[in-house]
């Protein structure tokens, strides 16, 4: 690196510029004249150089705000080309303290040093702006407005602001580009990131069985193996997107192959897609009436239903057969269900109802076994015309049992003969059967029908009353009358025969 010329300005320990003097001896306030002679003039203490208020350069210095004899009125701007300048194109600059060419030479040296350390060479005349030739205040701030160094400072500040803005714009551009690239990548990769899936509603037909307890993933796997959906993952994604996994039900479904996962989900949620046979068993039917109905609806041979091992259908321990325990309800029979499956479902439905009404516990309260309570419920179901009649019929039964009087219930005689009729003759009442309550006191040996839940409740909660007889006087309108007088009972029987057209 080049060293500065010998006549370059020097700085003291405080960073203040030391003026060039021809006389090596200290001179207070000495200022050279225009022709290079020195004369001693009083100067304010501490003044090294001053202006009339113009801005100072980066170099430290002091200034007296008041007028001072011998100080220049202003620090001139950069020398214009062709105005008596030196070879570099810089014009003579008078030092504020009166220094002439020597001061200018010192400033040229400082400008050269600055340029040597810079990455870019100053153009002629620009070095003087940064040479620090003008006076400054003690704290290094400019002493006035409009000076050349202030312009340089402003230019530097503007440059820094422009640089910051450019960096900010560049960073914003990079961020926007990255975001655009990321979005584009997601769009481009989406077909590769999403689960494989078909489009449309598919074609053909296929029956799929969903087993009880299957999860969405398990169902998706079943559908994928059957060729319904392209992947189990696509079905799981469709199910989660609609939050309907809890609505998926076991059973057989008629679907199509090559379906979009959402289309397959729609069919699984549609009741019409179920492949199921529904069988309704009304209250009060006998086993001999239930089994043919099931066989006809499901196609299961009647012989298979009649020959089912009673040990395989889950009967309660107190049951003595199917009668009374094939609970009346509507059942869904799936493809492939067997005779055992169907009858076991009916028995299980009875067990649910028995738990609901607390059959075993409450039977004790009416001095009956659970099996006897079911038998009473079957009598109520066979004789009752309306729900309101059920508790009253239960009371008649319990009142007659309490007096050890034969129940004389017509439906027991008809059950013994496997008949259905409203006309019971004297001959019918004499049939020899353990179910004939005209001939045998107490309850029949077992249920005579399959009662519903209301009849079970009535058997466990009889109405209060002294009735010993009841007659359904108008079967067409389901009118039943109750009495505790035998004479009224006889009159009610005559009313029934009249309505039936018999004597």
Image (tube, rainbow, N blue to C red):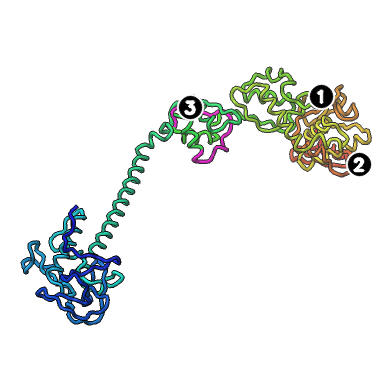
Residue 240 in the image, given as x and y percentages of width and height: 51, 39
Q: Which residue is mark 1?
A: 416
**Do the residues bearing badges 2 and 3 touch, measured as CB atoms within 8 Å?**
no
Q: Which residue is mark 3?
A: 224
- How crowded pointer 1 is (Cα within 10 Å; few <14, some 14-19, many 20+) is rated as some
The residue shown at (45%, 27%) is 257
Q: Which residue is mark 2?
A: 485
Residue 498 in the image, given as x and y percentages of width and height: 81, 37
Quarter of the figure with residue 302: top right
| Distance (Cα) linking label 2 and label 3 | 73 Å
- Residue depth check, mark 2 versus mark 3: number of the one nearer the observer: 3
Q: Nearer the viewer, residue 86 or 349?
A: 86
* In the image, residue 172 above or below residue 52: above
The residue shown at (88%, 35%) is 367
* In the image, residue 141 above or below residue 465: below
Q: Residue furthest front?
A: 25
Residue 278 in the image, given as x and y percentages of width and height: 62, 30
Would you say 260 lies left or right of 346 here?
Answer: left
Would you say 263 lies left or right of 58 here?
Answer: right
The residue shown at (26%, 68%) is 16
Examine the structure image and report whether residue 254 is included in the region drawn in magenta.
yes
Q: Which residues are magenta?
A: 240-259
- The answer to whether one can see residue 126 in this image is no
**Do the residues bearing badges 3 and 1 touch, measured as CB atoms within 8 Å?**
no
**Label 3 secondary element:** helix
**Label 1 secondary element:** helix
């Amino acid at each position: 690196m080049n060293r500065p010329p010998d006549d370059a300005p020097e700085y003291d320990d405080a960073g203040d510029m030391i003026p060039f003097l021809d006389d090596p001896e200290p001179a207070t306030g000495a200022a050279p004249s225009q022709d290079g002679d020195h004369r001693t003039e009083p100067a304010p203490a501490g003044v090294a150089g001053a202006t009339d208020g113009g801005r100072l350069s980066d170099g430290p210095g002091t200034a007296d705000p008041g007028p001072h004899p011998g100080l220049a009125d202003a620090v001139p701007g950069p020398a214009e080309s062709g105005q008596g300048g030196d070879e570099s194109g810089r014009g003579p600059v008078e030092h504020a303290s009166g220094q002439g060419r020597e001061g200018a030479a010192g400033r040229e040296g400082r400008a050269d040093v600055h340029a040597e350390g810079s990455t870019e060479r100053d153009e002629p005349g620009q070095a003087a702006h940064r040479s620090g030739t003008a006076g400054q205040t003690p704290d290094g701030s400019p002493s006035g407005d409009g000076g050349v160094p202030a312009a340089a400072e402003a230019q530097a500040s503007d440059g820094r602001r422009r640089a910051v803005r450019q960096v900010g714009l560049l960073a914003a551009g990079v961020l926007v580009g990255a975001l655009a690239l990321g979005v584009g990548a997601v769009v481009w990769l989406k077909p590769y990131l999403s689960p494989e899936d078909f489009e449309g509603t598919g074609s053909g037909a296929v029956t799929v069985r969903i087993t009880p307890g299957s999860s969405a993933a398990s169902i998706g796997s079943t559908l994928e193996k059957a060729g319904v959906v392209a992947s189990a993952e696509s079905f799981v994604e469709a199910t989660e997107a609609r939050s309907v996994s809890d609505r998926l039900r076991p059973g057989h479904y008629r679907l199509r192959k090559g379906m979009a996962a959402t289309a397959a989900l729609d069919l699984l949620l549609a009741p019409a897609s179920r492949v199921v046979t529904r069988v309704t068993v009304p209250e009060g039917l006998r086993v001999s009436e239930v089994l043919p109905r099931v066989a006809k609806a499901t196609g299961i041979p009647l012989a298979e239903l009649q020959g089912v091992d009673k040990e395989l259908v889950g009967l309660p321990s107190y049951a003595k057969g199917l009668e009374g325990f094939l609970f009346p309800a509507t059942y869904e029979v799936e493809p492939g269900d067997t005779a055992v499956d169907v009858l076991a479902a009916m028995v299980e439905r009875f067990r649910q109802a028995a738990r609901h009404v607390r059959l075993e516990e409450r039977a004790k309260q009416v001095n009956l076994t659970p099996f006897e309570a079911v038998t009473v419920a079957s009598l109520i179901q066979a004789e009752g015309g309306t729900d309101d009649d059920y508790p009253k019929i239960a009371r008649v039964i319990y009142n007659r049992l309490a007096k050890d009087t034969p129940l004389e219930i017509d439906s027991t005689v008809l059950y013994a003969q496997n008949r259905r009729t409203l006309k019971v003759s004297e001959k019918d009442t004499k049939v020899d059967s353990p179910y004939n309550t005209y001939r045998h006191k107490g309850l029949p040996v077992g249920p005579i029908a399959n009662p519903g839940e209301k009849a079970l409740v009535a058997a466990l909660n009889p109405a209060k009353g002294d009735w010993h007889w009841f007659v359904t006087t108008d079967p067409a309108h389901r009118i039943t009358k109750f009495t505790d007088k035998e004479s009224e009972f006889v009159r009610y029987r005559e009313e029934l025969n009249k309505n039936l057209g018999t004597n």
